[in-house]
Image (cartoon, coloured by chain):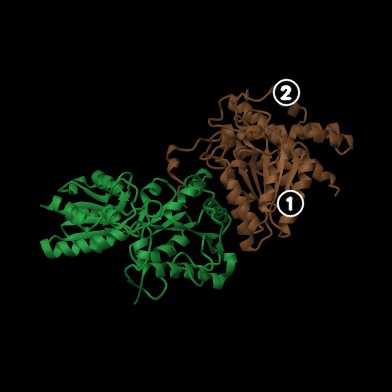
Amino acid sequence: MPVAKEKLLDLYRTMVRIRRFEERVSEEFAAGNIPGSVHVYIGEEAVATGAIAHLRKDDYIMSTHRGHGHLVAKGGKMNLMMAELFAKQTGYCLGKGGSMHIADLDIGMLGAAGIVGSGIPIATGAGLSARIRGTDQVTICFFGDGASNIGRFHEGINMASIWKLPVIFLCENNLWAVSVPTSTSLAIQDIADRGVAYGIPGVVVDGQDVMAVYEAVGEAVTRAKKGEGPTLVEAKTYRYRGHFEGDAGTYRPREEIEKWLARDPINIFREQLTKTQMLTEKQVAEIDKEALEEVAKAVQFAKESPFPKPEETLDNVYA
Amino acid sequence: MREINLREALGEAIAEEMERDPAVFIIGEDVGKMGGLMGEIGGLYDKYGAEKVRDTPLSEAAILGAAIGAAITGLRPIARMRFCDFMGIAWDEVLNQMTKMRYMFGGKIKVPLTMDALSGAGRRSAAQHSQSLEGMFMCIPGLKIVLPSNARDAKGLLKTAIRDDNPVLFLEHKRLMWGGPKSEVPDGEYTVPFGQAEIKREGSDVTVVATAYMVHRALDAAEKLQQEKDISLEIVDPRTIVPFDKETVLNSVKKTGRLVVFTEECATGSFAGQVAAIVADEGFDYLDAPIKRVNAPDTPVPYGIILEDFWMPDENQLIKAINEITS
């Protein structure tokens, strides 16, 4: 199905916004302005962008420890994100959560899961909730190759499948669980093959190609909305930086990194769009400039914001 | 007033809350046609169907995970965990998810989730089906914990739990669920608030803080001591250990000058230890004798009658401790 030009430009813009945000996060971390650990999404932008493009504001996503990209794509506010990373009172979580724990229920972001794999059954629950409340909301659950070896992958997907819940399980297979490669942690090539065990489709998609992700997830969303149940989508992708900022990632072979750098998702999409005259050089520059300005404003907001008062530690334990 | 037991109270509370609020639903193993291990929620499956009385696969992590997902998106799940011992299979959901979300997301999320589970020994069920783990759960900020000792409290407290906007663990003692004593319950609607201890027997010589089934053993001991030695026990039942009504306990100790904490837990890391610490810290001047704890030994729960009866704290141990601080 042809995709409207404006939608294509939106996809491109979202990918660039994520990239510029993450580059700045990396810089600010190095400068000592972000006190806690951060895991950036550089290299994986096509996955969040292509998948979340199908969702309405009231649809749900369950994110991961590498979650900034998901949140930007779902409509998260960069200034609140950056302020949270800076541990400021004005941040998404009042400075209590940090990079790994941002939620925004107003836009259906159910939270980043700091414990790998923990989001899978929670996403099943969001799907169950939509079913019981009688809405047509869908949930996309992001997780990585590492999470696919956690017991909750099995429990959560099985439960969603037997009840035919409207959940898309989107595995961002970036080939490495911190320093352990999938070649030593999986006995199969494709995690998507595990869909067979739950009686659901398992689809492998090129995670560097935003349109491929868009198409695959589009089919999964349609299936979910028709009441036919979940789909397991595996996007093959790569994180361009270490597991966390400060991790040099020396355990990864140089040739492998270069091979994936040559398939930069933003470059791939820009070439596709410029080749078909959907995007001009001028627009490329404009989109980039706007993204940089948005990120700069977010950093300024974060820097100018106050820290929480020490005694705020005691708030928000109970509702 | 009607008289019912704790098992019936539990069923009535859940049925009434499902009737009152369409957001309430049940998820767990054997909750459907079986109606719970003792048929305690029998009839609800026929009334509400599989949609809202959800039998699950044997997937404790997914039961609690799904309950969390439902709770944060507008529903009020009751996750039935069968035995509290089984909650180890879903430990991360308790430890890192439901109890952390509100805090780490800056107070912008509510997790109205009730978990109920059987607790306690005395059913010859051995080490994996008999534990009292409230001390371990108590260490997790963000969780509320209910330990009812009779049907009236259980019904009112469970209704409060289901209406609460936080994760609540409701622990029902097996000796109270299987043919336990009956108590009078009001006919109409009522709830029992959290964080309000109840004095189950007034007395003047020794304060005994007891929970769940141990409340009944403490009451038996009180009767015996009154008749045989004219010692008067005041039995305080906290009913919820989080939040804990320390005022009622401190006021009682102020009156009696003596405290025994009588719970069915391994002593190390127990709720009993916490009560003793609070009273030592904030009520030291009231005390005329050392605080005593009467708990279970630090061993797994054994199987057979002789060993398990030795393991469970009983009236004789309580009386012995009281004699030590009153003679």
- Of A316 and B113, nearer the camera is B113
Q: Nearer the viewer, mark 2 or mark 1?
A: 2
B225 relative to B56 in the view: left or right: left
B146 relative to A295 in the view: left or right: left
Instruction: Return the x and y of residue A26 as percentages of the image width and height.
Output: 63, 28
Q: Is residue A35 above or below residue B5?
A: above
Q: Which residue is mark 1?
A: A220
| Amino acid type assigned to the residue bearing label 1 in the image | Ala
Whole-angstrom CA distance, mark 2 to mark 1, is 34 Å
A39 relative to A219 in the view: left or right: left
Whether the residues at callouts 2 and 1 have beta carbons within 8 Å, the answer is no
| Displayed quadrant of residue B194 | bottom left
Label 1 sits on a secondary structure element that is helix
- Say which chain tag 2 marks: A
For the point 60% across and 41% down, the residue is: A149
Figure chain in green: B
Instruction: Return the x and y of residue B252 as percentages of the image width and height.
Output: 22, 56
Instruction: Return the x and y of residue A318 as percentages of the image width and height.
Output: 45, 50
- Say which chain tag 1 marks: A
Determine crowd level at label 1: few under 14, some 14-19, many 20+ residues with C-alpha closer than 10 A: many
Q: Which residue is mark 2?
A: A255
Instruction: Return the x and y of residue A245 as percentages of the image width and height.
Output: 60, 28
* Same chain check for tags 2 and 1: yes
For the point 33% across and 67% down, the residue is: B180
Q: Is residue A89 visible?
A: yes
Figure chain in brown: A
Label 2 sits on a secondary structure element that is helix
